[in-house]
Image: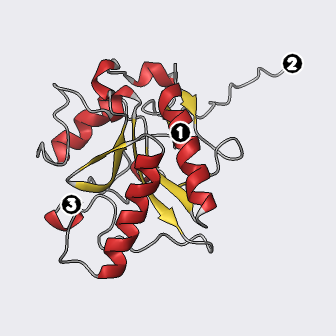
Amino acid sequence: MLIEIAPPAFDVALDLRYATDDNLTGRPVYRRAVCLLHPDAAARLARAAELARGAGFRLRVYDAFRPVEAQWELWHALPDPVYIADPRLGSNHSRGVAVDLTLDDADGRPLDMGTPFDDMTERSHHGRTDVPRAVQRNRALLLGVMTAAGWQHYDAEWWHYQLPDAERHPLLTDAAAGGRMMAVPVDPVPVPVPEMA
């Protein structure tokens, strides 16, 4: 079972990049912008949102549950296992227990993290000392909020966090989301009504 992550139940901003063309593929991967997580991950996200709010920030979510079908699309765009999990092995996003996110300031602007989301380069790695000090502080703040809420970071991406026991969860397809993410939306087709004589 997956839980939908959306205000007001979750105090987060949604900026689901894989439902837009503003991602590494250059086109929408999801047909609908739906943010979902496993219940354990949802509870930890709620805790992280509370911690961020207490420090004067708000979480901005870029991605959460990612169906296996979507993982294949990302792999075809960038088959580099440092940044994109090989779908044959599985992504923790496809288990519903990983989230990509950043922190917004009090005005709703994302903090400067030195690289944009989906910048698949070494400058996106945690622990970089060749980025400005303000960027190092911002990354450390996000790391602190997320680890205090029970998340584990991924070294190669400042934005990626997952549950520590992620691999115990099964991989899920779009069927787990009720077919809402990958299915192409169907517009109702008007049915001609016969004229009555």
Q: Identify the amino acid type marked 1.
A: Val
Residue 50, horizontal then vertical, whole percent: 61, 50
Q: Which residue is mark 1?
A: 34
Q: Identify the amino acid type marked 3.
A: His
Residue 24, horizontal then vertical, whole percent: 27, 56
**In the rendered image of this protein, does residue 146 appear above or below residue 111?**
above
Q: Identify the amino acid type marked 2.
A: Met
The residue mark sitting in front, 3 or 1, is 3
| 3D distance between C-alphas at marks 3 and 1 | 27 Å
Quadrant hosting residue 87: top left
For the point 45% across and 48% down, the residue is 148
Task: Give the SS element for disc 2.
Answer: loop
Q: Is residue 103 visible?
A: yes
Q: Which residue is mark 3?
A: 125
| 3D distance between C-alphas at marks 2 and 3 | 69 Å
Q: Which residue is mark 2?
A: 196
For the C terminus, give its image quadrant.
top right
Q: Is residue 99 left or right of residue 87?
A: right
Is the residue marked by circle 3 packed among few (<14), some (14-19), or many (20+) residues within 10 Å? some
Is the residue marked by circle 2 packed among few (<14), some (14-19), or many (20+) residues within 10 Å? few
